[in-house]
Image: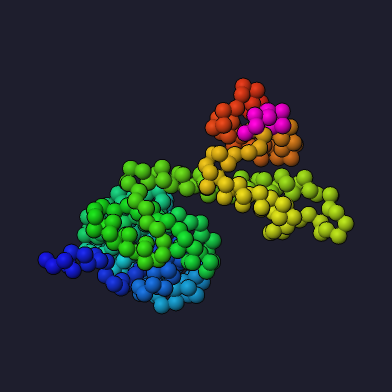
Amino acid sequence: MTSKELTRDPMPARLAVGVVSAGRVGTALGEALAAVGHCVVACSAVSKDSIARAETRLVDAKIMPPPDIAAMSELLILAVPDTELPGLVSGLAACEAVRPGTIVAHTSGAHGISVLQPLTDCGALPLAMHPAMTFMGTSEDTPRLSSACFGITAADEIGYAIAQGLVLELGAEPVCITEAHRALYHAALAHGANHLVTLVADAVEALRESLKGTELEGQDPVSELPRDVAERVIAPLLSAALDNVLRRGRAALTGPVARDDAETVARHLDALSTTSPEIADGYRAMALRTAQSSGSGARMFEILNERLPE
């Protein structure tokens, strides 16, 4: 074997790609693969939104049932919700739709490659390739992939080389996640991204309530429109806080819990409980975790462990 053969990329230069399905993630990934030269030959789409995405963003792909897509694919992307993935895999294996040698990659964060075992037994090469990115179902999703990391899991060095090559082609960064750590990896991302949305939405709701009826002369009334005054007030603070914590870690923490100002926290809880007991519950939970990590005193924990008013 020559040195050239030893260093040859194990992934074909161009692949016939099938996507199941044209949801938010599948469409973005299919569009990104097409942009770097792969041929997206087919996709599945059932809902009105997914059909529209397929027709406008995966324009060369035929809309077909999953078994037919699998039969014509060299790279089969399974971009379905976590709960649907095992059933899809079992169904494709049962009908022997996947040809031996097909690269089968799912985009689930929670699953590794064990969920693909029925297809691996059929001769497929299994990959887990999860983009650590949030998707809204718009064309903006696709360029965001190039700034994302992909959590990849494979069965062997060849699989990792293929996954790494695909991710690097997209301009993204591959990171290795072991099979045993997929759940922890996914939990960390969900805790950070999903709970951030809940946290910020609750903060905006409470802030909006505090601003109602206080408009200065010439200001529009406070509303729930996107980017209204509440969002404008809190956006610079949130941006600075996120930037600080990503650069400095827990040293970026400020505010009453960090200062061990238990009485201010008590007043916060009283005010939030009047506005929304549910938001107060969320504040209490996050303040308690913050107090644990910052070493607050006994009075802080006494206040945070009190029951909310009935």
Q: Residue at x 78, y 54 (%)?
A: 222
Which colour assignment does the render follow? rainbow
Residue 229 locus on image (x, y percent)? 74, 55
| Quadrant the N terminus occupies | bottom left
Q: Does residue 163 appear in this view?
A: yes
Question: Residue at the right extreme?
Answer: 217
Residue shown at 72%/32% (left/top)? 264
- 270 left or right, relative to 108: right
In this picture, residue 297 sits left or right of residue 125:
right
Q: Image point 71% across, 37% down: which residue?
A: 272
Q: Name the one closer to the observer, 284 or 56.
A: 284
Measured from the top left, where is residue 214 in percent x and y? 84, 49
Residue nearest the observer in this picture, 10 or 109 = 10
Q: Is 95 above or below relative to 182? A: below
Outermost residue toward the bottom?
A: 60
Which image quarter: residue 278? top right
| Position of residue 261 in the picture relative to residue 146 (left or right) | right
Q: Residue sitting at 69 percent across and 32 percent down?
A: 265
Using the rendered image of the protein, determine whether residue 305 is visible from the camera's viewpoint. no
Instruction: Please say if 229 is above or below 202.
Output: below
Side of 153 relative to 121 (left or right): right
Q: Give the number of marks.
A: 0
Q: Is residue 150 above or below residue 276?
A: below
Residue 234 falls inside the magenta stretch: no
Towards the viewer: 87 or 75: 75
Q: Position of residue 81 (x, y in %)?
A: 44, 55
Magenta residue check for 261:
yes
Quarter of the picture containing the C terminus is top right
What's drawn in magenta, residue-wise?
258-265
Q: Residue furthest left?
A: 1
Q: Position of residue 157 (x, y in %)?
A: 24, 55
